[in-house]
Image: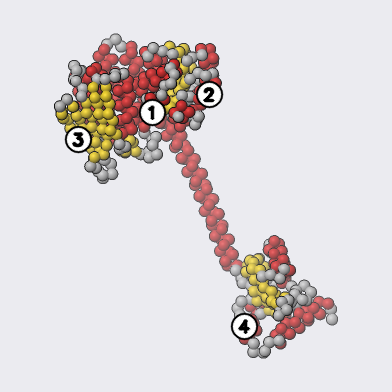
Amino acid sequence: MRIMIVEDEALLALELESELQSAGHQVVGHAMASKDAMNLAAQTMPDFAFVDIHLLDGPSGIDVGRHLHELAIPYVFVTGNLKRIPEDFAGAIGAIEKPYTMSGLQNAVTFLETLVTAENVPISSAPPSLVVAPAFAC
Amino acid sequence: MSQDSQSKQDARDAGQRLVESRVSEDPFAAAFKATRMPMIITDPRQPDNPIIFTNRAFADLTGYSIDELIGRNCRLLQGPGSDPEKINRIRSAIAAQENISIDILNYRKDGSTFWNALYISPVRNIQNEVIYFFASQLDVTNVKNKEKELAEARRMAEKLVDERTRDLKAALDAKTLLVHEVDHRVKNNLLTIASLLKLQARLTTDMTVAGTLHSVLDRVEALSIVQRKLFTSEDVARFDVAEFTRELVVNVVGALKRDDIVVTLDLSPVLVPAVKASPLSLIVNELVGDAVRRGLKDGGGRIDVTVKRLNGHFLIRVDDTVETVDFDREQQEFGRLVLETCAKQLRARIERSMEGDINRVEVTLMVAGEEE
């Protein structure tokens, strides 16, 4: 998949990029603030995105998420505080809670790739490292 | 004779008639005169419903002489502090010929005030016409003052409580913000530590270095899961070992991507104090990690993980049917060291056994609450 990373911690973003590349994905770009993230999404139109909630310009990851949802770009939140996520998950498939483990991330990415590219993937097969949004859970 | 003294005379005459209509030793009249309860009788059939009879107690209460009171309307007791709304209610009751009981601020002759618990009741003749009004008074100034003092004390107390509550809330908000900030930092730092280890592991060409980095990463990640699971349940002081174990095993085994691994989980909730979360989680991590390193990741096999309470104890059991492969002695020794040190900290007992092809490790410890 062509993937966009929205994350204000550069080291975390770098490692996530490496991990995704190892899994055979292409990272089209990395943004640290909401405006950059929206521009990047418009320019690259990625297949998927990982979005941190707390960015350089504050808790604006949710706005980025809603914007991606409008562009029909599937995404998940990556955050240390699940309580920050609005009830409707802002259109996200789910969330990966920080600090995630390497295995947890890999399992989540494998599942998300299947979910985005294939049809009729049972959401119940989601790994525990992925918190599925209520809209997808039922 | 002037109009005023005429009407006063009329009132006095009416009072006289009232007394004369009773036999001289009438005990009711005697009681009326002698009681300590201030009482008056008024005549509504005369202009302005004047007082026609009053007792000594009423004169003493109001400071007027009996002579001054006869022929006057009761409103002589009212003053600027008397509530107009209450005065209206008294008027309406009299006009409607109904009983009324009301507390009103009244004035004595000398201008001093008293709270009057006033009760007025119409007196009817046999034709059911109202011929008199009977009124009793009670000085409730003390009660009213007490009420006022109480209300003032309550208001002060409420104000104080409000101020304290506001201070406490502000302090709590500050602390909550701090806790969230610290929690956020700890989580980010754990992930940053993990990222640093992974980045270097990716860069190195030395397999031993990569192995060592991953070995450390493995333990850091166990602690990361603990940090995530802490403070999420309703009881923030408790940590569910079973919940941790489920995520750990599913994650680790899932990432091996082997179809020949069979996992059985027998997990019942076991809540432990948050301070025990880290060593307990590292124990579970070592037990599962040991099976993975000994050969689960190479040759597959069966792994059964049990977390439950047993006879007042807390049991973690890992059974596996791993066919032991050639594994890193140093790694195994490190794993044992972590396991035994954590067990020592928790005063837990480690038992290993072999049963056929099943390799079993059991860790037992006392559960909090039963150990105290």
> Furthest residue to the bottom?
B24
Question: Label 4 sits on what residue type?
Answer: Ala
Is residue B107 at all visible to an observer of this figure?
no
In which quadrant of the rendered view does residue A13 lie? Answer: top left
Between residue B307 and residue B80, name the one nearer to us: B307
Question: Label 3 sits on what residue type?
Answer: Arg
Q: Secondary structure at mark 3?
A: strand
Q: What residue is shown at x 73% (from left), y 82% (from top)?
A: B15
Q: Is residue B56 above or below residue B337?
A: below
Q: Is residue B108 toward the left or the right of residue B205 in the image?
A: right
Among the two numbered marks 1 and 3 on one chain, the one whose residue lies closer to the N terminus: 1
Report in which chain the residue with disc 4 lies. B
Label placed on residue B186: 1
Tell me where residue B60 appears, x and y as whole percent: 64, 76
Estimate the spatial distance between the alpha carbons at disc 4 and disc 2, rounded to whole Å.
88 Å
Question: Label 2 sits on what residue type?
Answer: Arg
Q: What residue is shown at x 27% (from left), y 11% (from top)?
A: B206
Q: What residue is shown at x 64% (from left), y 76% (from top)?
A: B38
Name the residue beneath numbered marker 2.
Answer: A66
Name the residue beneath numbered marker 4.
Answer: B31
In which quadrant of the rendered view does residue B273 lie? Answer: top left
Name the residue beneath numbered marker 3.
Answer: B349
In which quadrant of the rendered view does residue B289 lie? Answer: top left
Foreground tag (3 vs 4): 3
Q: Is residue B57 above or below residue B140?
A: below
Estimate the spatial distance between the alpha carbons at disc 2 and disc 1, rounded to whole Å.
28 Å
Foreground tag (4 vs 1): 4
Say whether marks 3 and 2 touch (CB < 8 Å): no
Foreground tag (2 vs 1): 2
Report in which chain the residue with disc 1 lies. B
Estimate the spatial distance between the alpha carbons at disc 1 and disc 3, rounded to whole Å.
31 Å
